[in-house]
Image (cartoon, rainbow, N blue to C red):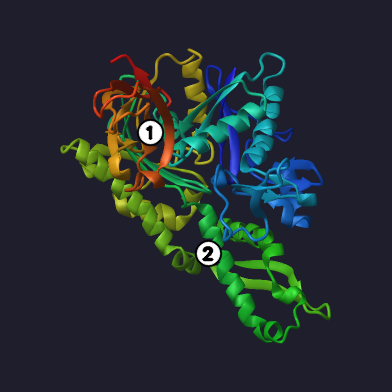
Amino acid sequence: MYIGIDFGSTNTTAALWDGKLRMIELNAAGTTTMPTVVTMIGETALVGEEAVVAGEKNPAYDFRNFKRMMSEPWHPDEDTGAQTAEEIDPETGLGTGMLAFVGPHDLHYLPTELSTYIISAIVDAANQFLKPHDVVSGAVIGVPATFTPDQIEAVKQAARNAGLENVYTIEEPVAAAIAHNIDARRPGATFVVDFGGGTLDTTLTRSRDGLISILAKNGIADLGGADFDKRIADYVINLWRSEFRKELEAGQVADNGQLDRVMPKILAEAESVKKRLSVYEETTFKLDPVSRTIDGVSLPMIYPVSRAILNELTRDLIDRMIAACKATIEDAIRKDAKFSASGDIKAVLCVGGMTRVPAVRQAVEDFFGKAPRKDENPEQVVAQGCAIKAAILEGRRPDISLADILSFDVAIEGLNNVPVMVIPRGTSFPSKKTLPVKTSEDDQTEISMRLLWATRPRAEDCHVLDALDIPVDPAPAGVQRRKVVVSIDDEGHPSIESVAA
């Protein structure tokens, strides 16, 4: 059986469709949510709640938010304390240029490897849940709409490394829309705000006669709950440095007050504070000790944090969220001038743990002029949508179909290092476009084509989606002509191939 997995930046859940939607229990206690946390003890990986507990005593090897760093190049200024470094090739001893997490004994773990530990635990729990009637043979995994093809492939590789042979992906807000419109009879459009721990996705959908259509979508790859946590952490660090300024300036603090070692603990407590402030108006950030003087005197972080302070610290982040919502509606209007946000959007669906933050929900309500729906569980709806998509793929839900659109522009590399648009963002897929190409110089022996994710004005700065080299016989410029086909498959993945002229 195929299952649906919401592999989240903060938490991971899974679901299945066997005549009805069911969340998969991930442990004997019946818990359906697993923290997306890996803690390395020696070379042993602990995951989920075990990792959280172990991480209290081993904060340097308590790894979180690695999904957001999938296939990310290493940057020396990466703001993760001392946890990340450039991956080292064990055979050559040289850096690969990719970001890795540093575990015990200086072993390096790519985000893909850490993701494999989480997905493996989910698959094991799902097999136990299905036992003895069925086993997991494949999965549909939710990914952010802002993920690059390399990041999507990294998620798929992590799942394959976890033992899954059949792996498909679906954008998380699209999965949420499927779950919301499972009966495909709710009239009007639905706007999905998917605000998780690492990314923000915004999607406008419409359902009619069993067809769920994606009208427009947008997103921000570097906006999520982790950014809210960082704002809280920075706030209390500044208070701590101010409180113990004399000790720090006098050099009386062990390790001169360096916080890299305990930054994972600080961020974990910041996340806890954020969650508590979704329920209470005020709480206390408490870590004791954070550091000590050279005489062994504890220097704790114990500071009150109010919901009002959190709102002020993160006002610009919420403004960015609303800007993405606005951009999505503007895309829909460009495609259909008759579309009206106030008249056509009948429901607003909030998905992801960040939508539990009161200021986030209030901003969404203020922007749309209507309260977000409360009947879906924001931590479960993506996994449920993935499970329905899995059932569609296996033919167990033939009554629902999906018409999706590209979330990015596809271009080819043109002359003078300029991307030339081929298939624009918002195009329905699967889709194909045939292009004539010719040599541009005398005596060329091949025509080289690069398919680009057109996010930058210069081709060399764009992400390469696919590449093609077409051998040709030497001839004057323009004599050798060929045709290529740019295709977008039913999962939204672009490719380029040569066809007969």
Q: Nearer the viewer, residue 370 or 435?
A: 435
Name the amino acid, label 2.
Answer: Arg
- Decide if residue 20 is in sight here: yes
Horizontal side of residue 293 vs 80, given as left or right: right
Residue shown at the point (46%, 18%) measured from the top left: 392
Q: Are marks 1 and 2 in contact (CB under 8 Å)?
A: no
Horizontal side of residue 494 vs 240, given as left or right: left
Measured from the top left, where is residue 208 in percent x and y? 30, 23
- Mark pair 1, 2: CA separation: 38 Å
Q: Residues within 10 Å of mark 2 (few under 14, many from 20)?
A: some
Q: Which residue is mark 1?
A: 451
Measured from the top left, where is residue 54 in percent x and y? 77, 50
Residue shown at the point (57%, 28%) measured from the top left: 15
Q: Which residue is mark 2?
A: 231
Horizontal side of residue 166 vs 106, given as left or right: left
Q: Residues within 10 Å of mark 1 (few under 14, many from 20)?
A: many
Tell me the quarter of the image containing the N terminus: top right
Mark 1 vs mark 2: give the one in front. 1
Residue 238 higher or lower than 34, as above or below: below
Q: Nearer the viewer, residue 398 or 443?
A: 443
Residue 288 higher or lower than 345, as above or below: below
Ranked by sequence position, the earlier of labels 1 and 2 is 2
Q: Nearer the viewer, residue 305 or 249?
A: 249
Which residue is farthest left?
338
Task: Give the structural element (helix, strand or loop) at label 1.
Answer: strand
Tell me the quarter of the image containing the C terminus: top left
Give residue 34's quadrant in the image. top right
- Decide if residue 31 is in sight here: no
Give residue 295's quadrant in the image. bottom right
Name the amino acid, label 1.
Answer: Leu
Measured from the top left, where is residue 422 in percent x and y? 28, 32
